[in-house]
Amino acid sequence: MFYDPKKIEVLLDEETLSKRIHELGAQITADYAENPDIILIAVLKGSYVFLADLARAIDLPLSIDFLGLSSYGSSTKSSGVVRMTQDLSKPIKDRDIVIVEDIVDTGLTMKYLLDNLQTRQPRSIKVASLLHKPARAQVEVPIDYVGFVIPDRFVIGYGLDFDQRLRNLPFIGVSVDGGPPYP
């Protein structure tokens, strides 16, 4: 096994994740039913699993684009310095966009992204975040679609990593001892 199950506590299991993501998809479908041409913008790398499941839960025509941001490096805490590592492939002017993020904790990365995308003149911007960790918030940012509010613990799995590993866990967990949860 590629991880040590004794070193990981499951915070959100597969069934819980699936149920909530389908609820979020239904909410987005209802919110955009009158104007059903949205762009989901995934923030790489952590949100790719959430994006795939959320896109399938939305019953509307949609487009998908990706951008890359980094504020963690190989640390378990945000540095506070946001760096764009990959930009969008198409313009978003006069389009409705939904930013798909794995987690909002300090809010610094999301604030940077919202400010950046607003200069590109989209018709609207909404944020869908699988996880929200309000205990670490340094700035307030709007989150229109929140999957789960979680405690201030470093989470892994379902796209979230521990030093670029464990993104492929089918659940969201936390390291029991704070160290690497793999052999």
Image (spheres, rainbow, N blue to C red):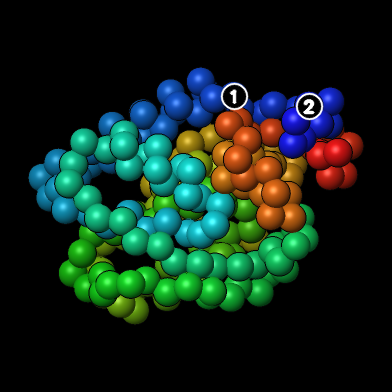
Direction from residue 152 to residue 43 in the image, left or right:
left
Q: Left of 36 or right of it: where is 7? A: right
User: Where residue 145 sits in the image (x, y, percent)?
Assistant: 40, 42
**Quadrant in which the C terminus appears:** top right
Is residue 140 something one can see in this rendering? no
**Element type at marker 2?**
helix
Residue 99 in sight: yes
- What's the residue at 50%, 28% (across, down)? 17
Residue type indicated by callout 1: Asp
Picture disc at residue 5: 2
Give the position of the N terminus as an image quadrant.
top right
Q: CA distance from mark 2 to mark 1?
A: 14 Å
Closer to the camera, 169 or 33? 169
The disc, 2 or 1, on the residue closer to the chain's N-terminal end is 2
Q: Quadrant of residue 40?
A: bottom left
| Image mark for residue 13 | 1
The type of residue carrying mark 2 is Pro
Compared to 149, does 72 lie above or below?
Answer: below
The quadrant in which residue 179 appears is top right
In the drawing, does residue 49 fall left or right of residue 58? right
Residue 22 spot, x, y in % from top left: 36, 29
Name the element at disc 1. loop
Residue 64, given in percent of the width and then of the height, sits at 31, 56
Name which residue lies at 47% across and 50% down. Answer: 48
Answer above or below: position of 67 versus 29: below
Crowd around label 2: few <14 · some 14–19 · many ≥20 (10 Å): some
For the point 46% across and 42% down, which residue is it? 50
